[in-house]
Image: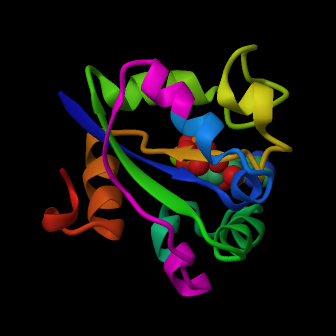
Amino acid sequence: LERTLIIIKPDAIKRELIGEILLRFENAGLHVLAMKMVQVSKRDAEKFYAEHAGKSFFEKLTTLLSSTPIIPVVLSGENAIAHVRKIMGATNPVDAEEGTIRHDLALDGTQNSVHGSDSPDSAAREIAFFFNTLEIF
Ligand code: ATP
Ligand code: MG
């Protein structure tokens, strides 16, 4: 079984979509191993999304992520990283397939409701960013 990190982003929490989003992952057979609500600083958001530093949307993205609380969640399952990204859909909701979280729920290409790790290395880094080993079940 593989682990991955998702984040329920501010736009989804503000619109009361926490349950809806978790239900989609649980219904797809993914298991919740860890979860909490946190608010990160701008600096932490910049560290989390360091791979995007210098891109046109970096300021908007890190401002959004640090604006209000977020919910990082560790999910486990068969091919969890790829499976989760399929359930989330393409980055921009206008490109996302029908039935994906971003197609059905996201507001735009930045406020796209969820984050998901994109590789085993990023999953390991992102899980450790939010959780210590005692917090993962
Ligand atoms: P995530 O990493 O959040 O799971 P992703 O892997 O689909 O999403 P990335 O390319 O890693 O997309 O971009 C990270 C985040 O930056 C996106 O989820 C989105 O919020 C924002 N973003 C990406 N591209 C753009 C863009 N062209 N314009 C505005 N915001 C963007
Ligand atoms: Mg990404």
- Write the start and end of the magenta stretch as one range: 23-45
> Please, which colouring scheme is shown?
rainbow
Residue drawn where x is 53% and y is 21% of the image: 86
Query: 43 above or below 118?
Result: below
User: Which residue is at the far top?
Assistant: 98
Find out whether residue 82 is within the magenta segment. Answer: no
* Quadrant occupied by the N terminus: top left
User: What is the number of callouts on the image?
Assistant: 0
In the image: residue 94, left or right of residue 20 = right
Which of the pair 58/127 is nearer the observer? 127
Q: Residue at x 51, y 73 (%)?
A: 38
Residue 116 rendering spot, x and y as whole percentages: 49, 43
Q: Is residue 53 above or below residue 109?
A: below
Residue 82 point in image, percent of width and height: 40, 25
Residue name at image x 68 percent, y 62 percent: 55
Residue 39 magenta: yes
Q: Nearer the viewer, residue 84 or 121?
A: 84
Asked where in the image residue 99 lies, by quadrant, the reply is top right
Identify the residue at image location x=72%, y=15%: 97
Residue 45 lies in quadrant = bottom right
Q: Is residue 30 left or right of residue 23?
A: left
